[in-house]
Each structure stands twice: as C-alpha cells, then as structure tokens.
Image (spheres, coloured by chain):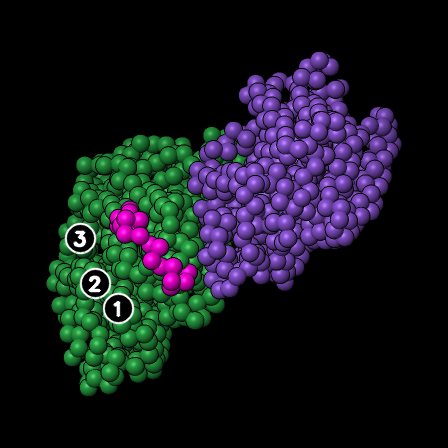
Chain colours: A green, B purple
Amino acid sequence: MQLTGLISLMVAAPLLGALIVILLPGTTATAEGSEQSVVGGVQRMLLCGTALITGLLAFLCAVGMMAFYATHSQAYMQFNEKLHWIPLGNGQWVNYHMGIDGISLLLTLLSTFVISLTLLYATRSNERLKERLALLLLLESALVGVYCAQNLVLFYLFFEASLIPTYLLVGMFGGARRASAAIRFFLYTFVGSVLMLLAIVALYHYTGTFNIAALSSSSSAAGIALRHLPSQALFWMFAAFALAFSIKTALFPFHSWLPDAYAEAPVVGSVALVLLKMGIYGFVRIAIPIFPQQAQNMAPLFIVLAVCSIIYGSLVAAVQTDARRVIAFSSVAHLGFVVLGIFTFTRIGMMGALLQNFNHGIFTPMLFLLLGMLTERRGSTDIADFGGVKKVLPMLSTMMLIATLGSIAVPFFSGFAGEFPVLLGSWVSSISHSVGGYWPTALAAAGTILAAVYMLWWYQRIMLGPVRFEEIRKMPDLNRTEWAVVLPLACLIFWVGLGSGFFTRRMNQAVNRLVPYYREQIDSSLPVSAMVSDEREVEEKQVRMNLRNHALLITSPDAPAPALQGAHFSPPPILKGIPVRGYHPRRMPIPAGMGGPASKPSGVSNRSLPMQHGKPGGAAGAASHRPSAPAHAVPANPNAPVMQSGAGEKHP
Amino acid sequence: MTNAQSMQAILPVITLLITGMVVLLGDAFLPFWRRSGVASGSLSLLGIVIAAGFALDRLSHQPTHSLAFHGALSLGRFTQACTLLLLLLAGLAVLLAVTYLENRRLNRGEYYTLVLFATSGAILMAAANDLIVLFIAVEMLSVALYVLAGFARSEPRSEEAALKYFLLGAFAAGFLLYGIALIYGGAAISGLGGTTNLALLHLRQGSVPGFMTVAGLALVLVGLGFKAALVPFHMWAPDVYEGSPTSVTGFMAVVVKVGAFAALMRLFIAFAPAAAYWLPAIQIIAVLTMVTGNLLAVTQTNVKRMLAYSSVAHAGYLLIAVAAAATPAAQPLALQAMVFYLAAYGLMTLGAFAVLAWLSHRDADCQTLSDLRGLVRTDPAAAWLMVIFMLSLGGIPPTMGFIGKWYLFTAALQSHQLWLAITLALVSMVAVFYYLRVVWTLCFEEGSGISVSRNTLAPAGVQISLYVAALLSLLGGIAPIVWQPLMLAARSLGRMP
C-alpha cells in the first residue's frame, strides 16, 4: 500500500505549528521575571496545545508510515512524492522528491518522537516559551526533511535549515558562554556544508542529475557517468561530503564544537543537538552509496578516527567535572562506535551502527532531560554540587540509572543491541583487520569498559553516597509532566534492548543494498567466512539464475535497479541475447570468502523477485533506454547543456 | 518595431516619468497635497503599479520584435523581467520611504519624483541597446541619486555622501563616455562605419577585437563598475551608504545594482565572441570584489557600512553570472541566475535596510550594531525579520539567498569556471560570520539597544514593505517556482537582429 502525502504532512505540520506559535499573541516580551505573569492561562494552553498537537501529528505520520511500510518490498524508497521545485530551464527541474526507506524511517521516528517529548518538557518553563516551542518545531520539520529528501539540493536545504533553529536555541537560551558556543557550532558545520554544496554542484555538472537514487545506482546513466570520472575528481567529491558529515558527526579531529555546544546549550538545545543525526545519515545515504569505491578505500582512515573518537571521548569524559560535559564527551565516543560500524563494510556492523545511532538518540536526550530536571532543582551542573540524590529522589535516580545503563551498553538495555553488532562487525571485517589486526576491535571494546567506568562513576558521584547538601533534601521528585517525558524514553530503551528486531527488520533491504554481498569485507582467515560462503553462493547463484531466467541485462550486480519501484529513473534496459557474463567483466568474478553473516534469506529474495518497473521519467530516465556501454560515459540527459560539452573528461 | 509600437513598449517608463512630474507639481502647487503627507507616496505607488501592469502585459505577450526606436532600446523579455523586478523594488522602497521620511521629518514630495526618475533610468539601463542610450540612462539614474543621497540636507554626513558620490560619479561618467567613444572609433576603424549599437557591434564582432575596442570596453567596465560598486571602484560605497538617509541607501543599493548588472550583461554578451579578451578581467574583478567586500565587512560595527561592504561582495557574486555568460552554452542559465540573484539580493538588502528604517525615529537613526542589541526582547517582530534577511544574505536555506547562490554555482560550473565557484564557496563562509554577528547581537546579547518608541502617526508603509520582502524571500527559498515566469523571461536577451 502506498500512501502519498504523509511525508509532506510530516514536514509541514511542525512548520505550520511553528508559524501559528509565532503568530499567537502575547508571552514574548517577558524578559523580566516580573512580567512572566503575563503568560495567561488560556494563551499558554493555546500555545502549548498547538505545539504539542502539531509535533505529535508529525510523530503519528511517522508511526503511520512505519505501520504501512512494506518490509520486504524491493522498492528503493516508499511513500514517494515528487513535484517540480526549482526550474533549471529547458524543461529541466530540480524536483521536490521525498521518499523513505528503513534507515530514514527509523530516524524520522526518532526525531519526531524525541522532539514531541522535548516540546512537552519545554512547556514546563515560562521563559520565552513561544520562541522555544517555535524553534523546536522548526527543527523537527527540518530534520524530517533531511531524512526523507531524495535529491541532493533538497537534502542540502534541510541540512542547512536545521542549523538555524539549533543555533538560535543554543545561542538564546544557553549558559554563560552560549554565544561563542553557538557561533562556533554554526561556523564549524557551515564550513563543511559549503564544501558539500560545491561537491553537489560538481556532481550535477558531471552527471546531470541531483537524484540520490540515480547517482547511487551503478546502472543508471548518471551512475555510469560518475563511475567513469577520473578517480581524483571522485576522491575530492567524496572528501567534501565526508568532511561535512564528519564535522556533523563530530568525529575525532572535528569534534571540538560538540562539547561546548552540548554543555552550553539549554536542555532543549542539547536534545536538539543530539538529534542532528544527519552526519551519520549522510554517510549511509550519500557518501557511501554514491562513492562506494572511494569510501572503501578510505575506510581504514575512518576506522582509525572512529577508534580514536571512542578512546579519546571516553578518557576525556572521565575527567570532566561538569555533569553535562561528561555526557557530551560520551557522545563523541558513542558516535565513534557508529562510524566504526559503518566503515567495517559488513552488514552486521552497518546494522549495529544504524541501531546504535538510533539508541544514541534515545538515551542521550534522556540523560540530558533528566539532568535538566535535576539542574533546575539544584541550580548547578557541577558534579561536586550533587551527592546522595538517590535518597531524596528515588524515581528520578532510577530513570537516570536506566539511561546510564543504556549508555554503557549493558545487555538488555538498548546500547548493547547496538554496540555488540558493531564490535562483531569490526571483528570479522577485513578492513579493520588490515588497519591493525584485532587492535581496532580490542580498543573499541575497551571503550565500552571505559564507558562503564566514567558513566558509573558519574552516576555514583551524583546519585549515591551521603546527602551532602541541605538543598538536595528539599528537592521534589518527578512530577506528572516529567514522568510523561521520561517514561516513554525508558520504555524505548528496554524495547530496543530486548526486541531490537522490531527496529532493524525494516532496514534489512536498505543495508543489503548498502553493503551488497560482493562488497562485504569479511576477513577470509576467520572461520566465519567459510560459514557465510555457502550463503554467498546461494545468493550468487540466485542472481545468475535470475539473469538467465529473465534474460535481463543487469549492468552491474550491485544494481539497486530491480528495486527501483517508484524511484524516478527507469529500470535497466532489457536487451535480449546479450551474454550476461560478458557485460561487466571486472565485476563478475566474485572473490572467494565474501558473504554476509548478517544477510538474511531476504537478501536472496532481493534478486529473485520479479522486476518492478518504475515509470521512466526524469533526467536519468531519458538516457537509460539506450544500450549503455560501460566503456564511455553516457550523459544523463542528452539535452543538458552541461553534458554537451562532454561529461567527465573536461575540466574547467 | 514602428515608432508607435516602440512608444507602446516603453509605456512603463513613460508612466513613471509622468507620475514623477505630477507628484512634483502637485507637491509644489497644492497645499493640501503637502499637508496630507501620504499623497505623493501613494500616487507614486499607483504609478509604479500601473507601470508594472504595462510591463506584465508585455511580458505575457511574448513580443516577436524586441528592438525599439531603430535599435536604440531592446525591449525583449529580459528587459521586461528586469523592469518588473525594478518596479517591485521601487515600490517597496517607496513604501519604506513613506514611513521613514515622516519619522525623520524629511517628507517632501520631490523625494518620490527622484525615486521615480531614478527607477526609469535603471529601467532604461536594462533596456539600452545603444551605448549612448546607456550613458543617458546612467546619468538619469545617477543625477537623481546624487540629490537623493543628500536629501537629509541638515545633516553634514548626508551632504558629504552626496558630494562624494557626485564627484566620483562624475569622474566615472567620464570614463564611461570615453570608453563609448573608443568603441565607436574601434568600429569605425574596421571600415563598416562607426556605431555604438550593441546589436550591430555583436554582429560585427570577431574573435579578435581591435585595440580601441578593447580599451573602450575596459573604460566602459570602469564606468559601470563604479555604479555596481565593483572592487577597485567601490571606495565610495561605504561612505555614501552610511551617510545617505536609510531609505535612500536601501533604494540605491538595490536599484543601481539591477540596472548596472543588466547593462553589464548586455554589453559583454554583445562582445561574447571576443570573450578571451575580457573574461580574465571579469574573473579577476569578481574574485577581488568577493574577497575584499567580505573581508572588509567583517570589521564593521555600523550596520549600514557592513551592508555596504556586503553589497560590494554581492556584486562580486553577480559578476560570476556575467563571467558565466561568456560561454554560449551557459548563457541562458547565467542570465536566469543573474536575474534570480538580483531579485534575492534586492529583497534581502532592501529588507535589511527597511528594518533599520523601521527602528529609526526622529531622535535616533538606527545604524550601529549596538542599536540592535537585545532587540529580540524589545521588538521581536523587527528582530525576527532582520534574522530572516541576514540568513538570506548569508545564503542559508530555506531562503532565497541560498537558491540564488546555488544558481550561481551551477552557472559557474556550467561555464567551466570552477575557481569562481570555489571562491564563492570560500567567501560565503566568511560572509556567514558577519551576518551571524547581527543575529548574535539581535538575539543573544543582553541589554538595550535603540529605544523603541513607535511614531504611531506615521503610516505603516515600512511594515508592508518589510513583510512583503520577507515573505517573498522565504517563498523564493521554499518554492522558487513562484519566480519562474521572471526567470524564464530572463533566459534570453532577445534576438539580435
């Protein structure tokens, strides 16, 4: 079942909510405490009601899509929406093209869910409520947009648009050094994203399309044009994307904006910053699928950086005296795990990374929210100002313990379900093996121990021991709103920890596409490689049979082409009588010892299902009907003036 | 076109001129007119709307012939697009002036007359197909602006601005005229008879121009570069922008740019076959302008000066479109990118000045960063509007500034000028810093800036102008399709005869 319009609704609802909230009267000019009574009951209710309803509406859209999401569908994207957006002249358009797959779905679910709860949290304070709510709603809209955008311009638009509300949230409501933290965060990410914009325009220049699906498929005209570019050009484009995403992810040498921003931000701002998952998302949606070879070549570097992130983040977190900075540095470590999993180029590592990315979006906001509640009561974030809180606030402490254990990756809590597959993936991956034997895995595993050290110590200093301050004795425990904020998060932590399959199964197809069996980097010296080789053979046989049966020419085995229902370029050309083997000689001999431990039988069915043809159309569709010989680049659109001057060979 | 058709085709300009004279006479001879305070403004607005109606009508008719008055003017769809854009900006500027002048006690009818004359001058610059007509149009625009710059007669700064602008402007006009003469001479030397008609020059232009033509082109570039505030001809901009009354600054910053860039585009496209001779100069000036404008803007604490340097920087961005037009394949996209960016630049710059004008009142002219401190608490509406304009100027989505910049990127890459695109990307990072500093001052800093005491008697023109500009900039960023008619119209300069 294909519902259209849900994605747009999900983007538009918070946007509309933000507009209404901004235009609602009153409550703005309440800078001084004395004026806060201006926030009348009705007005306040109207304000919070609008924000919560629109925020929740977006969440419901995400839930609805999850319910109707066809888990086993071969479609590249579901719930597609496409409209003309930016005119380029000559009847060419940049499209407003939205769609969702398992990876996006999980992230939209996460952002709408956590932001709805954060909105609820934000309604408790009166100070400039209107702006807080409006900015959170704007952020929600932008985040959802990033995860659903199916073309690079749209992606960039939402990517950048999410910066503004975050910047303002941090800068307007943050702590003492908020302004410098905010501007540092903004400029840091902006530098990366401007380079990314250059890369996006360069991609268009070489291929004539912005469509992510077309660019990441190796059988589309755009994909073929791309793969025949000089490797240097490809490298620089990959580097621009990777830099932008690394900065956004706060990978080790680019992390320095993160601790300040996280710690100086108000609680809602910290949550907002944690939810900026588009760095990771960009890696798996853009950088790796469009530049698979470059990504693979650079993977050792990323693994080193990820391990550095883990160790560095953990060590620095251990010595912090500010409660929020501990969590900030722990985030660096957690995101290191995510990057490690992605660049192992194994299905299990990838899946674990994506799940860990989701987890990090649950327990870190929960920690920040609980810490915010605690800080409001105590008026300080210094660890030294706490102690023995558990005796006074048992409920809050319990909730905090759940979040802490989730963060440490204790089994049955969500962190374990994410980090364990990452470590497994790193163990079996030949890439991480090539970096330094088993050291990367060993160091990353040491990171989890370090996490236990600093997080438990942190928890112990705040919550346990004797009550050292009189003020702590007077603090009230969680009230009803606060329960409503933290309880759903706590439930989710257990849900992911106990039944992660519910969250991962929708990502199966996407991960299989991301790490196809012939690209999976399993270390052949491990027993596991022999174990998975049977599976690989089945899969390979299936593909060959498929080709023979349908007399299809699949231009390259990694083509997501059979799964392109709804994507806006046409399936690969059907040419009878051309021998399949002769087509892509450098692809066909599949190296032995490759297969996927995580590849479920669904990976096989990936190729066995009949073709589902999308409607031909769009830039790439025009050209992919011709017998596209791989020897030279076929322009994506023969009409495109760019391409007339020769795709790829020419340099300005 | 016959003369009658030609007259019909320039009806927008004629309407503006007639309205301007009526306003002048009414203000001079009718006492009730002057007392009402809004009569001149509203009549000017009416004239602008009627003129826009004529332009729209012509735009929708897709004229087959574009050359009017025996080739003196080219009134094709590109010109109509520029005309519409200019009229939109002029209308917003008039609305903004109604309030500002009333607040500053400067409300006199001749202001609107001068605005209308300057606008007609800019329209004619966009339409001029003959270098002599171009010169007259430039003078028509400039003379009105010299007077406008000194409109706050009682203020020394305003007078200084007017004098500076006039002296340097007259100097630049000399360059322009000398350049035109050389181009004429260059054409005469070739043996086919001297001409300043761009269409004819284009026809005759081979890939190797004579020395006189190149020298003439260089001098014309100096003259127009002065108007467009390109580095190194930008020295006047900060002082003049700072000294002029804010409403004039806003008008000047946008209208002159539109006129000057339309003229530059037409000129260099006419000489496109000889691109090898002028393209390097344009590229160097573009890079210089982008870098210098942005670097100097960083150090400013006066918002008007900052916006002046930023408008210098934006002129550099726009020059990328001119450079891209040297490649025939990229020409339509370059034209489209330029018109879109001009629209974006016009709306956001005018909007930013309108916020300053809105905050100014009799005793205090809002100019410096410290005037804006903590505005989000005292006047949230003005503050948020300013944030929108600053983000748009910085090229951050989802605003029109971003889409505009993106078009420029695309145009630069399509004409294989990768280095211009990279420079644009690099300086954008610098630019974001100083635009964000305004946002920082507005939203993050505590303390009180300018006292917000609204003159409730003043008409609400500036608000309308602000909201329209903000709405259009956001709309242009979210759904650029609303600008499509204008962009489509701008894709071609019209058939050269």
The residue where tag 3 is placed is: A505
For the residues bearing labels 1 and 2, Cβ distance under 8 angstroms: yes
Q: Viewed as shown, does residue A8 lie left or right of B27? A: left
Q: Residue at x 51, y 64 (%)?
A: B447
Q: Which mark is residue A373?
A: 1
- The alpha-carbon separation of the residues under discs 3 and 1 comes to 35 Å
Q: Which mark is residue A482?
A: 2
Q: Viewed as shown, does residue A164 lie left or right of B257? A: left
Q: Where is residue A98 in the image (x, y as percent from the top left)?
A: 33, 42
Q: Nearer the viewer, residue B79 or A443?
A: B79
Give, as a three-letter code, the residue at label 1.
Met
Chain where mark 2 sits: A
Give, as a three-letter code, the residue at label 3.
Arg
Residue B334 higher or lower than A558, as above or below? above
Q: Which of marks 3 and 1 is nearer the N terminus?
A: 1
Q: Earlier in the sequence, mark 2 or mark 3?
A: 2
